[in-house]
Image (cartoon, rainbow, N blue to C red):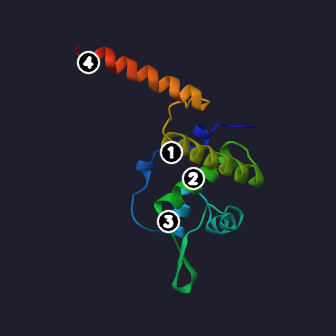
Amino acid sequence: MKANAAEVLTLPMPTAEFPRKRYYAIGEVSELCGIKPHVLRYWEQEFPQLKPIKRRGNRRYYQFDDVEMVRRIRSLLYEQGFTIGGARQRLREARQEQVASIAAAAVPMAAPMPVSRKDQIKDLRRELEELLKRLPS
């Protein structure tokens, strides 16, 4: 059961269903995503992408991105039928595809360079001759 990156990154539930705030407690994330707190703590061990902030007393605080990651993991495991290992690999592949597409967009396309020095000289001479033709006599 293989899905492409776009399917993995989108979820059927719209993000408007939960309030956008800075931190969510584990109980809030549990209710928002339909996952029990002990399952969330287990997923933290299994998925390196899921790293909530831990504060005093080892209390977990999830950020908005963490909540979206929980929803992706839930979708992969419960809706798409992946195993934990398969979901972990699918998230890793989606991340690599995302990084590759960002890198491809960031690298400007360079003009093809002439192969040899002779070709460079010929191209330069041709450009100079075209410029001379454009100058008034």
Which of 58 and 128 lies nearest the eye of the viewer? Answer: 128
Which callout, 2 or 3, points to the residue nearer the camera? 2
Check disc 4: other Cα within 10 Å, few if <14, some if 14-19, many if 20+: few
Quadrant of the drawing holding the N terminus? top right
Instruction: Tell how many labels.
Output: 4
Q: Residue at 55% of width from left, 32% of height from top?
A: 113
Callout 2 touching callout 4 (CB < 8 Å) = no
| First in sequence: mark 2 vs mark 1 | 1
| First in sequence: mark 1 vs mark 3 | 1
Q: Which amino acid does label 2 sit on?
A: Arg
Q: Is mark 4 on a helix, strand or loop?
A: loop
| First in sequence: mark 3 vs mark 4 | 3
Q: Give the CA separation, mark 1 to mark 3.
A: 16 Å
Q: Is residue 62 above or below residue 19?
A: below
Check disc 1: other Cα within 10 Å, few if <14, some if 14-19, many if 20+: few
Q: Give the CA separation, mark 2 to mark 4.
A: 66 Å
Q: What residue type is labelled 3?
A: Glu
Residue 10, visible in the rendered structure: no
Q: Where is residue 54 in the image (x, y as percent from the top left)?
A: 55, 77
Circle 1 is placed at which residue position? 13
Which callout, 3 or 4, points to the residue nearer the camera? 4
Q: Is mark 2 on a helix, strand or loop?
A: helix
Q: In this view, does 37 lie to the left or right of 29?
A: right
Circle 3 is placed at which residue position? 28
Q: What residue type is labelled 1?
A: Met
Q: Give the CA separation, mark 4 to mark 1.
A: 66 Å
Q: Where is residue 91 in the image (x, y as percent from the top left)?
A: 65, 50
In the displayed orientation, state which residue is furthest to the left.
136
